[in-house]
Amino acid sequence: MMTQPAEENRGVDPQSVRVIGRIKWFDQAKGYGFVVSESAQGVQISTDILLHVSCLKGYGEAHADEDARIVCDAVERERGWQVVHIIEMDRPRAVVARESGAPPELEPVIVKWFNRTRGYGFVNRAGETEDIFIHATVLRPAGIEEVEPGQRLLAAVENGSKGAHISMVQLTDRED
């Protein structure tokens, strides 16, 4: 097993393994998700690797996009593999869009239902029945505290392994 230079491993478990992989999924409300290893330094990791929000926050992010590339250090613990340090990760798509100044493509959606206590709900495209997941964490950056059934919004819809979800939202001026 190769060792990393002292500066690169500072504060990281000496038993850690450098992993290159992809985000399988991340649930911001639960505060965790999983990484699928594509390659690991000196070992074969055939199980998902737990990614806790505390590692993301240590990296300066609060969310990870499904299928985003990640380079991290992971350790094998009693309950399985866990990320302990993020070296590099693709930025969340909504953050990149905001920072680049190129607005994401927004489309009209209608709130089907939203549970404020649980912080999530579903919307539909006009005239369609496919449910699209929406979480409170995409409402807050837009200054939206709550939404009601039938309310119209403009939203960026993305597809992930769990289906369609809203990654960015804004209020619409339309009343119809």
Image (spheres, rainbow, N blue to C red):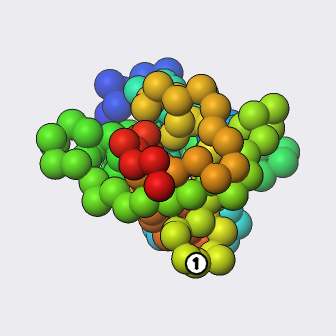
Q: Position of residue 51 (x, y in %)?
A: 62, 45
| Disc 1: CA contacts within 10 A as few (<14), some (14-19) or many (>=20) | few
Q: Quadrant of residue 100?
A: top left
**Does residue 66 appear left or right of residue 107 in this picture?**
right
Name, please, the residue furthest toward the right.
78
Q: Is residue 108 shown above or below 169?
A: below
**Does residue 125 appear left or right of residue 104 in this picture?**
right
Residue occupying image coordinates x 57% and y 58% = 110
User: As rendered, which of 27 and 106 lies closer to the eye?
Assistant: 106
Name, please, the residue furthest toward the front.
176
SS state under label 1: loop
Q: Position of residue 114 (x, y in %)?
A: 72, 46
Residue occupying image coordinates x 58% and y 48% = 151
**Does residue 82 appear left or right of residue 40 in this picture?**
right
User: As rendered, which of 160 and 134 lies closer to the eye?
Assistant: 134
Circle 1 residue: 128
Residue occupying image coordinates x 27% and y 45% = 96
Q: Is residue 63 shown above or below 128?
A: above
Q: Position of residue 121 (x, y in %)?
A: 71, 50
Q: Is residue 11 shown above or below 128?
A: above
Does any portion of residue 168 appear in the rendered image? no
Q: Is residue 11 shown above or below 110?
A: above
Tag 1: amino acid: Glu
Q: Position of residue 106 (x, y in %)?
A: 34, 57
Name, please, the residue furthest toward the top.
11
Residue occupying image coordinates x 64% and y 53% = 150
User: As rendered, which of 82 and 136 lies closer to the eye?
Assistant: 136
Does any portion of residue 83 appear in the rendered image? yes
Q: Quadrant of residue 141?
A: top left
